[in-house]
């Protein structure tokens, strides 16, 4: 036990209702209330067996090394690139995330950004609000969505949910994965990402982040997508090379974009924000009350399963 008697360290709040569930079962160290949570964690590390964090906050290798009694990390979110998975595996520390419960909301956001980009909804909103409609007249033409070609990079749970929505828009869908999926005969597999981009009217990025996919969508892929193509990213900002994307959007080499994630969050490049035919969101694809609650409950369910049965419901490691 630590000097505070805490056995569970909490780097992020799960919301008042779910924080109360944690406090009812464990002695909790609410580090999300601290200005320097990892520094405080390292100071009070001995005795902490469980840790709650998130895909954004993560946990550093340095902090993990300072936790000699840690047994489980339960993370709010799906992404694992900010978690010390290899170090945890080496020490026998189990790690969980919260998959599935956010897939439909993230797919909704992908489609919101696709429609917003294709039909220039952010620019149209500004056009109507500013009075330019009265002064300048007709708004520029957008791109039809119905019946077009949808390319998906990463056909996991979220990719599938995006593809299902495409059927409702009369779309033909192809995808690029590490390998084809025999259980998805309605969608075509494209082994080349460049060829998928060349074929697609809309290219949606839904693959995991991390070094394996860093800048997977680079200048050649964007060039293949072309001046009529639109890029949507609801995965991780690191997957798209922003230094290539921005000048290609400005020049018209790429037709438009809908972006929920960025390379250096929370920073959004001023050059990107100034481009009219781009729809931007602040990494909020899973940001609904319903999904946030389901994710928080799954974190607690994982903690309970580990405490009662020494297993995790949704293990990563």
Image (cartoon, helix red, strand yellow):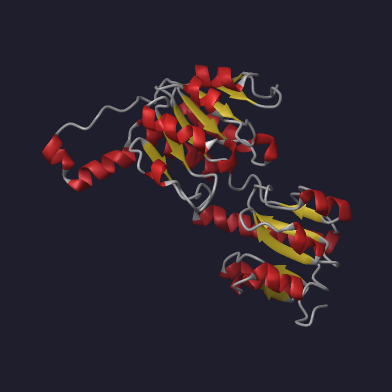
* Quadrant of residue 249 within the rendered picture: top left
Judge left or right: residue 107 versus residue 136.
right
Judge left or right: residue 186 versus residue 25.
left
Q: Is residue 312 visible?
A: no
Total number of numbered discs in the rendering: 0
Q: Is residue 263 above or below residue 43?
A: above
Question: At 64% from the left edge and 53% from the top edge, which residue is drawn?
Answer: 55
Question: At 68% from the left edge and 47% from the top edge, which residue is drawn?
Answer: 81
The N terminus lies in which quarter of the figure?
Answer: bottom right
Q: Where does the image place residue 180, in percent across and percent down from the top left? A: 69, 22
Judge left or right: residue 67 versus residue 140.
right
User: Closest to the observer: 287 or 142?
Assistant: 142
Q: Where does the image place residue 203, in percent across and percent down from the top left? A: 51, 28
User: Closest to the observer: 279 or 242?
Assistant: 242
User: Closest to the observer: 155 or 135?
Assistant: 135
Q: Residue furthest bottom?
A: 3
Judge left or right: residue 43 versus residue 54.
right
Q: Residue furthest left?
A: 135
Q: Is residue 99 visible?
A: yes
């Amino acid at each position: 036990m630590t000097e505070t008697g805490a056995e569970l360290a909490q780097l992020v709040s799960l919301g008042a209702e779910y924080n109360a569930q944690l406090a009812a079962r464990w002695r909790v160290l609410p580090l999300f209330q601290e200005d320097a949570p990892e520094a405080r964690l390292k100071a009070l590390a001995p005795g902490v067996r469980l840790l709650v964090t998130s895909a954004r906050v993560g946990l550093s290798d340095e902090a993990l090394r300072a936790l000699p009694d840690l047994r489980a990390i339960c993370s709010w979110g799906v992404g694992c690139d900010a978690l010390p998975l290899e170090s945890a595996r080496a020490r026998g520390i189990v790690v969980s995330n919260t998959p599935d419960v956010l897939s439909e909301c993230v797919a909704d956001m992908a489609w919101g950004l696709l429609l917003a980009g294709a039909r220039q909804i952010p620019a149209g909103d500004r056009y109507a609000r500013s009075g330019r409609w009265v002064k300048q007249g007709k708004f520029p033409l957008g791109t039809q969505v119905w019946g077009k070609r949808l390319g998906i990079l990463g056909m996991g749970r979220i990719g599938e949910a995006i593809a299902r929505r495409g059927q409702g828009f009369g779309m033909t869908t192809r995808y690029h994965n590490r390998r084809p999926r025999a259980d998805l005969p309605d969608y075509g597999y494209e082994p080349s990402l460049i060829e998928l981009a060349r074929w697609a009217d809309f290219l949606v990025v839904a693959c995991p982040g991390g070094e394996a996919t860093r800048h997977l969508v680079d200048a050649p892929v964007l060039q293949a997508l072309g001046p009529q193509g639109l890029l949507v990213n609801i995965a991780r900002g690191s997957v798209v090379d922003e230094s290539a994307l921005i000048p290609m959007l400005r020049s018209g080499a790429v037709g438009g974009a809908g972006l929920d994630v960025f390379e250096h969050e929370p920073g959004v490049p001023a050059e990107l924000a100034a481009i009219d035919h781009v729809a931007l969101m602040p990494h909020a694809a899973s940001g609904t009350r319903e999904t946030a609650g389901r994710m928080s409950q799954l974190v607690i369910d994982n903690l309970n399963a580990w405490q009662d049965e020494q297993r995790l419901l949704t293990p990563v490691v």
